[in-house]
Amino acid sequence: MHIVILGCGRVGSMLADDLDAQGHSVAVVDQDAKSFRKLGSDFGGLTVKGIGFDRQTLENAGIERAHAFAAVSSGDNTNILAARVARETYGVEHVVARIYDPRRAEVYQRLGIPTVATVTWTSTQIMRALLPMGADSQYIDPTGTMALAEVHIGQNWIGKRANDLATETQSRIAFITRYGATVLPEDKTVIQDGDLVHLLFDPERRDDVERIAEKGPVRS
C-alpha cells in the first residue's frame, strides 16, 4: 500500500517508520524540512516539503495512488482541510485526522471523516486510571447510533457468562482483552477478573449499560 502522512512530529515520524518497516510505500509531508530528521536512519520512504492541503504538494507525495492518508500535524485546521482534500478530491479510501479540539472532532466524525481526538483520549485514559468506572468510547459510527467502548465490569460479574452480560445490557460483546490477548466470546465464555470487556451498544443507552455493568446481574 502507498500511504501519505501529513506531519513529521513524534506521531508522524513513528507512524512512518513503522509502516515503512512493514514494507509499505510511505510519503511524509511537512512544512519544515528539519522535521524529517525525526525519521529513523533506515527510513526508505519519500519526504516532501510543503503545505499539507496544497494539491501540488499532495500530488508530489503520491496522493493520486495512495490507499490511505493520515493527517497528524500540529494544526487542527490543517489536518481537517488536508483530510477533506484527500477524501473528496482524490478519493482516498482510508483517511484519518488527528484533532486536538474534542468539539471539532465530534463534528468531523459525523461528517464521515474518522478523527483521533488526542486531548479527549488522553484525558479519558488518565481518568480511568484514577477512577476505573464507566465506559471508554473507542469508536462512534458517523451516524451516532452505535458505540464501541471498553466498559468497566463490576466484581459481581466475575464468574458469570459473557452472554448474560450482553443480554442484560442489551449490547453485544465485540471482544474481551485477557492477559494481553484478544478473546472472541463464545456461549461458554465466562468473565474473569482482569478482563477488559469491549461492548457495542446504542450511545443513548450508555447510562444503563454502565450501571448494569458496574452493579452486576439482576440474579447473582
Image (tube, grey):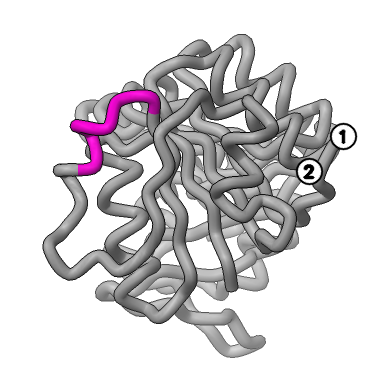
Mark 2: amino acid: Met
Q: Is residue 136 magenta?
A: no
Q: Position of residue 145 (x, y in %)?
A: 85, 37
- Whether residue 139 is visible: yes
Picture quadrant of residue 40:
bottom left
Q: Residue at x 74, y 61 (%)?
A: 167
Q: Is residue 35 magenta?
A: yes
Image height check: is 36 above or below 65? above
What's the magenta region? 31-36
Number of residues whose C-alpha sits closer than 10 Å to that of mark 2, classed few (under 14), some (14–19) or many (20 or more): some
Q: Position of residue 128 (x, y in %)?
A: 31, 33
User: Relative to the observer, which residue lies in front, 182 or 188?
Assistant: 182
Q: Residue at x 66, y 51 (%)?
A: 63
Left or right of 74, for residue 71: right
- Whether residue 207 is visible: no
Left or right of 150, for residue 168: right
Element marked by disc 2: loop
Mark 1: amino acid: Thr
- Contact between labelled residues 1 and 2, with CB atoms less than 8 Å apart: yes
Q: Tag on residue 143? A: 1
Number of residues whose C-alpha sits closer than 10 Å to that of mark 1, classed few (under 14), some (14–19) or many (20 or more): few
User: Relative to the observer, which residue lies in front, 175 or 117?
Assistant: 117
Q: Which residue is mark 2?
A: 146
Q: Position of residue 26 (x, y in %)?
A: 45, 62
